[in-house]
Amino acid sequence: MVHFVGAGPGAPDLITVRGAALLREADVVIYAGSLVNPQLLSDCKPGCALHNSAGMTLPEVLAVMERAEAAGKTTVRLHTGDPSLYGALREQLDALEERGIAYDVTPGVSSLFGAAAALNAELTLPGVSQSLIVTRLAGRTDVPQGEALRDFARHGTSMALFLSAGLLERVREELLAGGCAPDTPAALVYRATWPDEKTVRCTVDTLAAAGAAAGIRKTALVLVGGFLGAPYEKSRLYDPSFTTGYRRGGA
Ligand code: SAH
């Protein structure tokens, strides 16, 4: 059996209880060494075979899984954050399906949520934004037509950009081309939840300059939107005059 597990954003105590248990029981662990905190591996059982996928190809990863399966062993494939976001998950699941190898997926805390927490931010703020666009700038990996950053920028909603921290000048240009006001609040969060986490608040217009000044080029998220700014409305859920399924509001 192969367990795909989200490791969380970095802090070792941000893996789920289920993920940690699977990791403790694994005979073989294949971990994304560039972003997974190695401290998580210290609880693996003695003799557990550790493979860092940073230097491996997909066929090599699959070969490790196949060998483990043939020997009746349990494998954990440890992905950074949540495996469903930019995790190259599907190609592994499909390959296991073809080989008749059983698997399951345990979610993780995405770095997106690690970053929001680092900023004490609410991504869906009443009166400001009730939607979140999770995307990336086209780089060496293309994005499909209709998913250009400038097209998303037109919505004026909360946005989280993965894999784009090395391209901040282009991020700025795309956001402005899509009609974002230059003073739209923005933030960079570097290595959210790690001991060397850095947060930088800026605007769309100052994104590239702020990133350069802080020396941030990778392992960072770009967050954009009015949710990072001052004005908002209070939630109706907790409004004393608002009746909900659980509470009758006063006059
Ligand atoms: N599945 C992961 C994302 C993997 S893609 C998740 O859910 O978080 C790798 C990108 O994620 C990086 O380029 C960076 O944009 C972001 N990232 C991963 N860990 C991060 C962290 N601790 N802080 C900020 N960004 C992070």
Image (cartoon, rainbow, N blue to C red):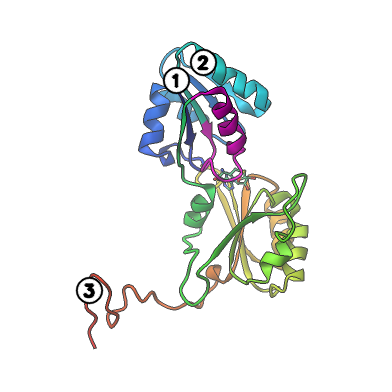
Tell me if I can see residue 244 in this picture.
yes
Please tell me whether mark 3 sits on a helix, a strand or a loop.
loop
Question: Which dot marks residue 247?
Answer: 3
Compute the Cα span from label 2 to label 1: 7 Å
Q: Which three-letter amino acid code belongs to the residue tagged 3?
A: Arg
Question: Which residue does the image show at 52% across and 23% down from the upper left?
Answer: 100
Label 3: how many Cα within 10 Å (few below 14, some 14–19, many 20+)? few
> Ligand 1, what quadrant?
top right
Q: Which three-letter amino acid code belongs to the residue tagged 1?
A: Thr
Q: Quadrant of the C terminus?
A: bottom left
Comes first in the chain, label 2 or label 1: 2
Question: Which residue does the image show at 36% across and 76% down from the upper left?
Answer: 236
Question: Which residue does the image show at 41% across and 18% down from the upper left?
Answer: 45
Q: Which residues are magenta?
A: 78-101
- In the displayed structure, 221 sits above or below 103; it is below
Tell me if I can see residue 215 in this picture.
no
Residue labelled with disc 2: 68
Please tell me whether mark 2 sits on a helix, a strand or a loop.
helix
Comes first in the chain, label 3 or label 1: 1
In which quarter of the view is residue 26 placed? top left
The x, y position of residue 155, in whole percent, is 63, 71
